[in-house]
Image (cartoon, rainbow, N blue to C red):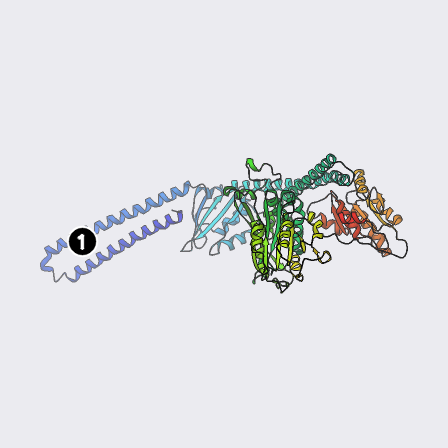
Amino acid sequence: MSLANKLAQERRSRLAAERLLEVKQAELFAANRKLGQHARKLSNEIVETRAEVATVRDENQRVKSDLSAAQEQIERVERRLWQSIETINDGFAFYSPDLELIMANRSYMAVFEGLEDIKPGVSYVTVLQLLTEEGIVDIGDMAPAEWRQSMIERVQLPEPEPVVIRLWNGEYIRMIDRRGPDGDIISLGLNITESVQYEEKLKSAREVAEAANRAKSAFLANMSHEIRTPMNGVVGMAEVLIDTDLNEEQRLYIDTIKNSGEALLVIINDVLDYSKIEAERLLLHPAPVDMEKAIHEVLMLLQPTARDKGIVLSVEYDLSLASQFVGDPGRIRQIFTNLIGNAVKFTTQGAVNVRVGGTPDKETGKVVLQIAVEDTGIGIPEDMIEHVFGEFNQVESERNRQFDGTGLGLAITKELIHMMGGRIWLTSEEGKGSTFGFEIALAAIGPPVVEHPQINPALRHALILDDFDLTRGTMRHKLEGLGLKVTACSTAERALELLDETVDTFIVAQRSKDADGLSFAADARAAGYLHQIILLMPVNGSAKADLQTETVDIIAQEPFTRADLTAWLSQPLPARAPEKESQHITDAAPAANVETTSPNTPRKMRILAAEDNKTNRLVFGKMLKELDVDLQFACDGQEAVEAYSTFQPDLIFMDISMPRLDGKQATQAVRRIEAETGVHVPIVALTAHAMSGDDRDILDAGLDRYLTKPLRKKAIISEIVAYCPDDAVAPCPDELDQAG
């Protein structure tokens, strides 16, 4: 029971005793009046009346005795109450409705030690005045009158807010005032000095931790730069060596060096990303993104690894769902890379399928995308599902120690999805596979729902031959969504049994290296099937050589997009086995080489590369050795500016960290020269910096694009081809351009 409640209870006890006394007094008065009224009438009964008077007198005596006992009890309770209050270490005081001190305990009065004016009856205003005049409170920069006025206004409120005051000795008192039903005020002063000191220690510790975190981020940024610079030499020279004449053993060594360097870069990127997330420095940069294209690009990137493991990659993108959205393209691709790459890593056989659907949200106008990555891998025990989203975690068991990685990929993915306002979940069955699903809401560019693509109206019935349940079901769903009747088979024997004239198109999956898919197609032709046959393959490989056999009509590379599928199904149905010239190959054919002819003898493209590191200059030169270009190097930013005027380059590759003038300063100097000439030479940054914000700083300095070290030969050649002027010869031989 609180102190206020105890006081109220004692007050009620005292009032009850007083009311009892009043009742008894009233009864006595009534008896006396009755006695007077009946005196004459009862004069002859005096003996009896005297007896009654005696009885009343005895009763009156008992009432007086009860009243005295009640008064003593009240006094005893009051003494006990104030004794209890005196034992409280915190200050306690009563003020009347007129803000006059009624009483206070020793802890409250201790603050005013030596001040005789502080006693019962003193006003609250006087108390405040003595607090400021005697220097008992530390009011900081406030004027004494201003502080007193604020305290008076506060205590006059119906429910005063607690306030913390600091005393001259450094102690902190939290004042809590409560107004009673009669207008009196109960004032409680809590000494919170230890709590304040603890909070100050926590604040100091937080500042130290934040400073350490900033130092860590700076350290990681510097280390990233220092590691990436030599890694550029390692990975770059490995790429150069791969293009030279090597025996099988030497090629194995170089592949090992290159793959190890790439793996190290993945680890560096994961550590940097997690560090930025932890420091709340990672920012999202919304921009247009083609969701279907982004998924397809990631699948194509992982295709070589999947092909080596015999894994089929597929994507099931809702036919009616738009593909253009507003999001962070880089981070969305990172999410797909982590989830799909993780599925490929932990799948030894079977398939990995990406399923994409979405529903418009009428309230926000956005599209809620539901994306799932399904695999037939090792699966995850139920008790370890939450564990996999932790930092530096993999499912710990003897069976999967063969899988490398930092254990940060899923943790980073989870945080990125949360930053996008989405959520991620996981369902898995050990030994059978896992499904990682996530949901994010993005604004669509254009209508969120698109019309179903049109296919050949003559198509009615499709037959699928695929021995993988996952990909077979995915293909069935796609074709049924286009309005086709679908028959799906897992064996060639069953497919040949069901292959009849009602089947307009026959889709065969090529899964093994011995061309089983082609054999099935040949058997179908031998059985008299003359309609369309589509062969699905991870790579075209051996099937390309079989084009002369008139076995298949279309060779399609997996994974494929919605546009690819509708293109195949939009072809006129053949009435016989197609000739070679009518065959449609959907393998990702290399883009036509960009060549510019001129009646005059074209010149070589002039390229200036500013790089202070000798090893990196060597790597860069070796990467461009086979190109038909005029390459000149500058060892620092100052040399680059000087060479710009004399060499007149068509394209500049600019390292960012260089002596004398760094890359940004050199670029700004070049842009000042161009402001007078009206010429604009594209400048591509070469940087080992990979922290958040580096890209914006680089582009804001006037550079057009940037490449992150270690440099990739393909990326460099792509930039050169893109910026080759019309009056220069094509920089790449046909075979190099196609390979790049």
Query: Quarter of the image holding residue 452?
Result: bottom right
Front one among 646 and 605:
605
**Residue 105 image-quadrant placement:** top left
Residue found farthest to the right: 600
Q: Residue at 79% x, 46% y: name it.
A: 654
What x and y, as percent, mark residue 483?
A: 58, 62
Q: Amino acid at mark 1?
A: Val
Nearer to me, 79 or 120: 79
Query: In this picture, is 500 found above or below 518?
Result: below
Question: Residue 492: horizontal and vertical position, in percent?
Answer: 58, 50
Q: Is residue 245 left or right of residue 568?
A: right
Q: Name, please, the residue furthest toward the bottom.
A: 457
Give how far across and how far down residue 169 sits, in percent.
Answer: 55, 40
Q: Residues within 10 Å of mark 1 (few under 14, many from 20)?
A: some
Q: For the residue labelled by badge 1, is the local secondary structure a helix, a strand or a loop? A: helix
Front residue of this view, candidates 274 and 497:
497
Residue 284 appears in the picture as rendered: no
Any part of residue 290 in sight: yes
Residue identified by numbered label 1 = 56
Which percent across, then down, holds residue 448?
61, 62
Horizontal placement of 712 versus 420: left or right? right
Using the image as rendered, state which of residue 108 and residue 519 is in the foreground. Answer: 519
